Amino acid sequence: MKIHEYQAKDLFSSYGIPVKRYILCHDTGEAGIAYDALSMEYVVVKAQVLTGGRGKAGGVKLAKSREDALLHAGNILKLTIKDYPVNKIIVTEAVDIGSEYYMSFIIDRNTKSVVLMMCAEGGVDIEDVAAKSPEKIHKFPIDPLVGVPDYLARKFAFVMFKDISQVNQMAIILQKLYKLFIETDASLAEINPLVLTNQGELVAVDAKMTFDDNALYRQPQVLKLFEPTEDEKVETAAKEKGFSFVHLDGEIGCMVNGAGLAMATMDMIKLYGGTPANFLDIGGSSNPNKVIDAMTLLLKDPKVKVVLINIFGGITRCDDVASGLLAAFEQLETDIPVIVRLTGTNEKEGREMLRGTRFKVAETMGDATRMAVEASK
């Protein structure tokens, strides 16, 4: 789950991490009022959308007067950044920047721990730095039984700074950010850039946080901040029906029983030159209503040209699945080709039930995938 910059800054502030004052606005009139309220000659107007690249897209502008703030607010509120329309902005105090740094805590699946990442080049895409100059990025695995005590925080801070005042500030920020990260079940807590002002103060100019969806049940204060995208709304609705669903950008809709088989199916589609439209694990049931719900979900995607149903019958019998498919498609109206691969318990009976119907039946996963890719093209 992602949250906006202003929401992350609220969390930062509640944990004592230094951020500049800001005011949330929804129109140009509010931006003018915000400029007056901040009583600053220089302010920054920033788009609030759940994606990166705002600066490159024109979503972050320095305003040197009230008129500038109104102009920038109006222009930014007309933007769409990476398919996200901008419908709110913040007007925040400008910072007298001396230098910029990057820091974050993130879950690392390889080390099975939280990792602290720091870089002396802030304000840029950390992925670009990692690709071109990986030696500039410092990574420190954090032992969950140790955390970030004073001695480690200072050790990490000395990697970035030599001045003792800055080291002390950095150590405090590290400890507070780690505490926030752990206590909110975050999967990412990022400051980019962390700015050293010309007055010698460290300030979090930007804030980014994402959270573990599986822990939201115990984070009601975080869940309140959830603003689902259209894709997330679909995924949530699918979860309520007992499906695991992730929307992708391809043309072959996939309906599979089992997460591992679903992943393998997507790999096979790519191998044969196709593009999967989704990950969809319907579980072990052959209930016709479940098939109807799954097909309805797939057919909502206008890009889907063909549906590949890949079922391994273990406890679930293939003839039961075939019966469910036949019953389901009596209620569904679609001209989209449907390829079905059944294997496992009672597979011959299941395939025989589908022969001569609207379904194209395949015996092997390779045959089914080839048929789906050809139909999609």
Image: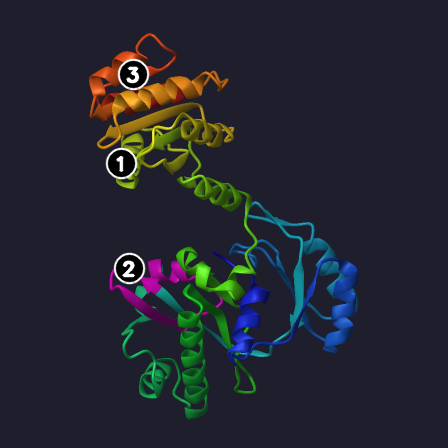
The residue stretch that appears in magenta: 107-131
Q: Position of residue 227 (x, y in %)?
A: 57, 54
Residue that badge 2 annotates: 109
**Whole-Å distance between the Cαs marked 2 and 3?**
39 Å
Residues at marks 2 and 3 touching, judged by CB atoms closer than 8 Å: no
**In this view, 308 is above or below 351:** below
Q: Position of residue 298 (x, y in %)?
A: 45, 30
The disc at residue 52 is: none
Callout 2, which amino acid?
Arg
Residue that badge 3 annotates: 361
The reply to whether residue 337 is in sight is no
Q: Is residue 282 magenta?
A: no
Q: Reading the chain from its start, which is encountered first: label 2 or label 1? A: 2
**In this view, 162 is above or below 121:** below
Foreground: 278 or 75? Answer: 278
**Whole-Å distance between the Cαs marked 1 and 3?**
18 Å
Q: Quadrant of residue 90?
A: bottom right
Q: Residues within 10 Å of mark 1 (few under 14, many from 20)?
A: some
Query: SS of the residue at dot 2?
Result: loop
The disc at residue 261 is: 1
Callout 3, which amino acid?
Val
Q: Position of residue 72 (x, y in %)?
A: 71, 60
